[in-house]
């Protein structure tokens, strides 16, 4: 039959419905437009998620989608036109995401729709068409040759595939909006938790509820470089709250001392550098943030280890000595002044002797062992040092200040 000959032969053709005879649309219209109710009924019968959902927004949209899809498909047959508008199907995808469903159900609905429609077309093409009530019509061969029927099937499934793709795009768009909104709400929560004073319980509960975060009984702040935040968060459980605040990645970890948490945090920080602040109750959250940030600064400048996870509570002395650098500098200058008046060689010997003696808690024998010298040598050196320090080494507080100054002032002594 002449209608079975492909009417379009241009090599630049892009759409499979262009290969279908132009007369097919008119011949198929009574068959195709009568399948809408059957498609919807079959979808409801075969997809549990839609059994009770056809009365709301989704039901209205899917009825519209089926109607538009059928009419639009007929208009495209025999043309090389692109789909004129996929907004209906884009919006269907968005509605699916807003209803909390995956795309599986909607994709199944598209497959069911194409199957039902093709079954009706196939029945009509061999003269055994049935009407919408299931009653056989009079034999009505569509007058399409086998080649045209094959191309019609190809056009139908390509058409449905494009509608489904539009829904996938709508779903992804809604997903991105929701993710962006959640991210914004989580940033608001994290940013507020980093400020002093800590939020009052009603404010914390409101912020946490908006961000989808459950305020824990205990929490610790984990800080790291901004560029490491994504990697670390992907390795942590979903109940953390994270964002970038003032150029630093901040993660609030619930119950950081709980079972298995230490290993999980260590694993999350592998290959990067991060600091965990002290574990606190929600009303003390700014303290864990401040402590972790202070330790992170020492990690960045090389004072503290710069690989993997460290805990600020393991480095309190370093934090104390660097909390007020001017105060520490004054302590070093005052308590180590006797060493500055020595020659370089004498000063080096005095520093090693004082350090060994202080670390040995005043045990001369132990200090001698550490120094690999005779105890009498240590006693001699100590006598000279006590004379130089004018009694400070005989005073418990004075010894503590000298020990702290030695801990903080090694580089200063080297410059002296």
Image (spheres, rainbow, N blue to C red):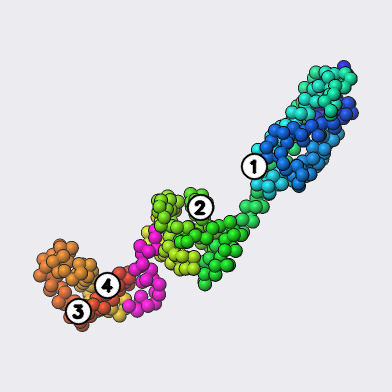
Q: Quadrant of residue 30?
A: top right
Residue 282 at x, y percent in the picture: 49, 65
Residue 362 falls within the magenta-colored stretch: no
- Considering only order in the chain, which callout, 3 or 4, is on the residue closer to the N terminus? 3
Which residue is labeled 4 in the image? 403
Q: Nearer the viewer, residue 378 or 316?
A: 316
Mark 3 or mark 1: which comes first in sequence?
A: 1
Count numbered badges in the picture.
Answer: 4
Q: Secondary structure at mark 1?
A: loop
**Which mark lies nearer to you, 3 or 2?**
2
Distance from label 2 to label 4 (Cα)? Answer: 40 Å
Few, some or many residues within 10 Å of mark 4 (<14, 14–19, 20+): many
Task: Indicate which disc, 2 or 1, sits on the residue closer to the N terminus.
Answer: 1
Disc 4, SS: helix
- Region of the chain picked out in magenta, as a range: 310-331
**Circle number at residue 214:** none
Disc 2 from disc 1: Cα separation: 24 Å
- Residue 320 among those drawn in magenta: yes
**Image quarter of residue 131:** top right
Against 238, is 123 above or below? above
Instruction: Judge the density around disc 3: few (<14), some (14-19), many (≥20) Cα neighbours within 10 Å.
Output: few
**Residues under numbered marks 2 and 4 in contact, where contact means CB atoms less than 8 Å apart:** no
Q: Residues within 10 Å of mark 1 (few under 14, many from 20)?
A: few
What crowding class fits label 2: few (fewer than 14 Cα within 10 Å), some (14-19), or many (20 or more)?
some
SS at circle 2:
helix
Query: Disc number at residue 233?
Result: 2
- Contact? badges 2 and 1 (CB < 8 Å): no
Q: Main secondary structure of the magenta part?
A: helix
């Amino acid at each position: 039959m002449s209608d079975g000959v492909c009417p379009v032969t241009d090599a630049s053709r892009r759409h499979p419905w262009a290969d279908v005879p132009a007369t097919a649309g008119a011949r198929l219209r009574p068959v195709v437009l009568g399948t809408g109710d059957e498609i919807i009924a079959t979808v409801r019968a075969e997809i549990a998620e839609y059994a009770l959902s056809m009365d709301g927004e989704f039901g209205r949209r899917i009825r519209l989608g089926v109607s538009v899809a059928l009419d639009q498909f007929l208009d495209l047959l025999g043309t090389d036109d692109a789909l004129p508008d996929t907004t209906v199907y884009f919006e269907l995808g968005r509605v699916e995401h807003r209803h909390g469903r995956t795309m599986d159900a909607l994709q199944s609905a598209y497959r069911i729709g194409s199957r039902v429609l093709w079954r009706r077309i196939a029945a009509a093409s061999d003269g055994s068409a049935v009407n919408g009530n299931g009653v056989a019509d009079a034999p009505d061969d569509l007058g399409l040759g086998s080649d045209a029927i094959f191309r019609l099937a190809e056009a139908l499934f390509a058409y449905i595939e494009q509608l489904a793709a539009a829904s996938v795009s709508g779903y992804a768009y809604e997903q991105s909006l929701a993710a962006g909104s959640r991210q914004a709400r989580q940033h608001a929560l994290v940013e507020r938790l980093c400020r002093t004073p800590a939020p009052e319980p009603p404010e914390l509960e409101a912020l946490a509820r908006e961000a989808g975060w459950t305020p824990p009984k205990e929490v610790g702040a984990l800080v790291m470089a901004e560029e490491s935040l994504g990697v670390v968060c992907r390795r942590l459980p979903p109940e953390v709250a994270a964002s970038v605040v003032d150029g630093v990645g901040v993660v609030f970890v619930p119950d950081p001392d709980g079972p298995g948490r230490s290993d999980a945090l260590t694993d999350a920080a592998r290959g990067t550098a991060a600091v965990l602040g002290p574990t606190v109750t929600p009303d003390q959250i700014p303290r864990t943030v401040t402590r972790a940030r202070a330790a992170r600064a020492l990690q960045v400048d090389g004072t503290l280890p710069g690989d993997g996870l460290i805990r600020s509570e393991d480095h309190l002395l370093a934090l104390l000595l660097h909390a007020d650098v001017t105060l520490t500098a004054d302590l070093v200058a005052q308590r180590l002044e006797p060493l500055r008046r020595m020659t370089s060689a004498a000063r080096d010997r005095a520093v090693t002797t004082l350090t060994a003696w202080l670390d040995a808690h005043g045990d001369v024998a132990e200090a001698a062992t550490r120094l690999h010298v005779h105890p009498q040598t240590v006693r001699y050196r100590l006598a000279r040092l006590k004379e130089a320090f004018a009694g400070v080494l005989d005073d418990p507080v004075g010894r503590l200040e000298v020990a702290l100054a030695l801990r903080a002032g090694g580089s200063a002594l080297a410059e002296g």
